[in-house]
Image (tube, grey):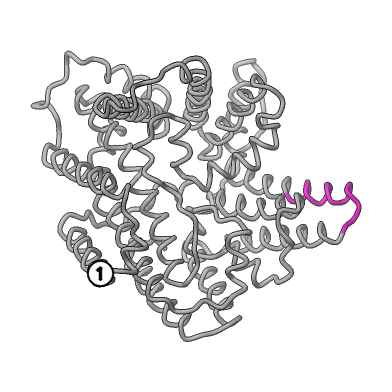
C-alpha cells in the first residue's frame, strides 16, 4: 500500500477514525492490527516473517534481562543478531553472493550445482530487522530496560508509518510513548498535517516530476548528449532526496497527528559544507544506527587514527551493501567511506591552519557556498553508481559528464520537463534556505490559521504541478 495511493487515503481515514475513538490498549490493538493489514496489503505471506522477527527479538531481550550469566547473555545476543542477519541474508543477499560465487568457479574452470532461490524481496525488511535488532543490542548494553509487553513490542516493530522505509525509530524513543495514552493536541495535528503535505509535495511534485528526466538518462545514457546526462545526474540528486525525505516526512507527520514524536530524518543535507556534515544530515536514523551498532562495535575511534579510518571505511562499505545486493551499492559505500577519510584527514592537516577574517562576511559566504557546491558535486558523482543499472553505465555517464565542449542546451531532450524541473528545484532550494531560521512548531502554535493557509497553498501546488501515477517510493526496494 503506497502512501500516494487512493487505497492508503481510505486506509488512513478509517485508521484515524478508529484510533481517536479508542483509548488505552485498544488503541495499541488498532495500531498493531492496522499495521499488519498495511504490510499484508503487498503480500500477506510476509506477515509470518515480521511476526517471527518480533517474537525472536522480544524473547531474546526478555531473557537477556533475566540472565545474570554474561556468557548466556552474549549467547542470546548472538542468537538475535545471527537470526536477524540470516533472515535478511536469505531474502536479500543469497542470490547475489551465489551468483558471484558461481561466476568465480566458472572463471576457475570448475563446474557447480549451486542454484539461486526464486524468492521475492519483502518490502521494508532492511528497516524492521535493523529496528528490532537494535532493541536487543540496547537491552544487552543496558541502555534500555526490556519491554515486558508483547503488544507494545509488536506495535513498535510493525508500526505502519515507518515500517517499510523508515525512519528507523529506536525502542528508547517509541516504546515509552506507546505506554502512554496519546491526547488530541491541536499543535500536534497542525504540525503533523504540515509535515504530511510537505512530504507529499516532495514526492509527487519534486521527485516524480524529476523522474521523467532521470529515468531516460539512466535507462539509456548512450542515446543522450553530455548536457542531458549532466541534467539527469543533478535531477537524480533531488529526486532521491524528494522521494525519501518525502516519505520520512509523511511518516513523521502521521505519527505526530497520533501524538508520537519521531526524530528528524533529513535536515537539509544538500546545504552541507563537507561529506562528514552531509552524513549528519542525510538519512539520520540510518547513519546514527551504523555509527552506534557497527562503527562503535568495530572499535570506533578508541584504538588510534588508523583503526578509526579503517572502522569508518568498513562501516560505509557495509552501509552501501545494506542498500542492496549489487556491486554498484558497494562502490557507492566505498566512495563515501573514502571521502569521509579524506575529509577527516584534510581537517586534521589543513583545517586548523586556515583562518579567515571573521569580519569579512563576503569572503565567508563565498567560501561557504564554494564548500556547499563542492560537497554537492561529490555527492552527485557518488549517486551515479547508486542509480545506474550497472557499472559500465556508471563509467560511461562519468566520462560523458566531463566532455564540456559538447554541452549544448539545444540538444537537451524533454525541454519542458527539464524547465519544469529547474523551476521546482529552485523553489525547493529557496524554501529550504528560508527555513534555516524558521521554527515551524512555534509558528503552528502562535499562528495556526497562517499554518493552515500555507498547507492549503502547498496542496494547490500539488494539484497543479504534481505528477500522479502511484509511483513506488525508491527506498521500498531496500
View extreme (front): residue: 359
View extreme (right): residue: 69
Residue at 55%, 35% (x, y): give it. 321
229 on left or right of 172: left
**Where residue 234 sits in the image (x, y, percent)?**
28, 33
157 on left or right of 240: right
**Where residue 272 sits in the image (x, y, percent)?**
38, 35
Q: Give the image quarter of residue 459.
A: bottom left
Magenta span main SS: helix
| Relative depth, front residue between 144 and 316 | 144
Rendered position, 368 above or below 284: above
Residue at 85%, 61% (x, y): give it. 66
Rendered position, 284 above or below 356: below
Q: Quadrant of the N terminus?
A: bottom left
Q: Is residue 264 magenta?
A: no
The magenta span reads 67-80
State the residue position of label 1.
Answer: 452
SS state under label 1: helix
**Where residue 439 sits in the image (x, y, percent)?**
34, 57
**Where residue 193 sits in the image (x, y, percent)?**
34, 67
| Relative depth, front residue between 55 and 16 | 16
Dot 1 surroundings within 10 Å: few (below 14), some, or many (20 or more)? some
Amino acid at each position: 500500500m503506497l502512501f500516494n495511493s487512493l487505497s492508503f487515503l481510505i486506509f488512513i481515514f478509517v485508521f484515524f477514525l478508529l484510533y481517536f475513538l479508542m483509548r488505552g490498549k485498544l488503541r495499541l490493538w488498532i495500531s498493531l492490527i492496522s499495521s499488519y493489514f498495511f504490510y499484508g496489503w503487498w503480500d500477506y505471506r510476509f506477515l509470518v516473517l515480521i511476526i517471527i522477527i518480533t517474537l525472536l527479538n522480544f524473547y531474546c531481550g526478555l531473557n537477556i534481562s533475566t540472565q545474570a550469566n554474561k556468557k548466556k547473555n552474549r549467547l542470546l545476543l548472538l542468537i538475535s543478531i545471527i537470526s536477524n542477519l540470516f533472515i535478511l541474508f536469505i531474502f536479500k543477499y543469497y542470490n547475489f553472493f551465489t551468483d558471484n560465487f558461481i561466476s568465480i568457479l566458472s572463471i576457475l574452470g570448475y563446474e557447480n550445482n549451486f542454484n539461486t532461490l526464486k524468492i521475492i524481496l519483502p518490502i521494508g525488511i532492511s528497516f524492521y530487522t535493523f529496528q528490532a535488532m537494535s532493541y536487543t543490542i540496547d537491552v544487552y548494553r543496558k541502555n534500555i530496560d526490556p519491554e515486558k509487553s508483547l503488544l507494545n513490542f509488536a506495535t513498535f516493530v510493525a508500526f505502519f508509518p515507518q515500517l517499510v522505509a523508515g525512519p528507523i525509530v529506536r525502542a528508547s524513543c517509541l516504546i515509552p510513548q506507546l505506554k502512554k495514552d496519546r491526547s488530541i493536541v491541536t499543535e500536534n495535528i497542525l504540525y503533523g498535517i504540515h509535515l504530511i503535505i510537505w512530504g507529499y509535495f516532495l514526492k509527487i511534485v519534486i521527485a516524480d516530476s524529476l523522474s521523467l528526466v532521470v529515468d531516460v538518462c539512466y535507462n539509456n545514457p548512450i542515446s543522450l548528449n553530455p548536457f542531458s546526462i549532466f541534467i539527469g545526474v543533478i535531477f537524480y540528486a533531488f529526486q532521491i532526496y524528494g522521494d525519501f525525505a518525502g516519505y520520512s516526512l509523511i511518516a513523521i507527520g502521521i505519527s505526530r497527528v497520533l501524538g508520537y514524536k519521531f526524530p528528524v530524518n533529513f535536515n537539509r543535507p544538500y546545504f552541507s559544507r563537507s561529506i562528514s556534515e552531509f552524513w549528519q544530515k542525510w538519512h539520520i536514523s540510518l547513519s546514527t544506527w551504523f555509527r552506534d551498532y557497527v562503527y562503535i562495535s568495530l572499535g570506533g575511534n578508541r584504538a588510534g587514527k588508523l583503526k578509526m579510518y579503517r572502522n569508518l571505511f568498513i562501516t560505509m562499505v557495509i552501509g552501501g551493501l545494506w542498500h542492496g545486493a549489487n556491486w554498484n551499492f558497494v562502490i557507492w559505500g566505498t566512495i563515501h567511506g573514502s571521502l569521509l577519510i579524506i575529509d577527516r584527514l584534510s581537517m586534521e592537516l589543513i583545517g586548523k591552519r586556515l583562518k579567515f577574517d571573521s569580519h569579512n562576511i563576503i569572503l565567508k559566504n563565498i567560501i561557504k557556498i564554494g564548500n556547499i557546491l563542492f560537497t554537492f558535486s561529490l555527492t552527485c558523482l557518488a549517486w551515479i553508481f547508486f542509480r545506474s543499472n550497472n557499472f559500465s553505465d556508471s563509467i560511461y555517464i562519468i566520462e560523458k559528464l566531463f566532455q564540456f565542449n559538447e554541452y549544448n542546451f539545444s540538444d537537451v531532450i524533454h525541454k519542458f520537463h527539464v524547465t519544469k524541473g529547474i523551476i521546482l528545484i529552485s523553489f525547493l532550494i529557496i524554501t529550504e534556505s528560508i527555513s534555516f531560521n524558521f521554527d515551524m512548531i512555534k509558528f503552528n502554535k502562535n499562528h495556526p490559521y497562517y499554518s493552515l493557509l500555507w498547507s492549503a497553498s502547498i496542496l494547490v501546488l500539488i494539484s497543479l504541478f504534481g505528477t500522479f501515477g502511484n509511483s513506488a517510493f525508491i527506498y521500498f526496494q531496500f
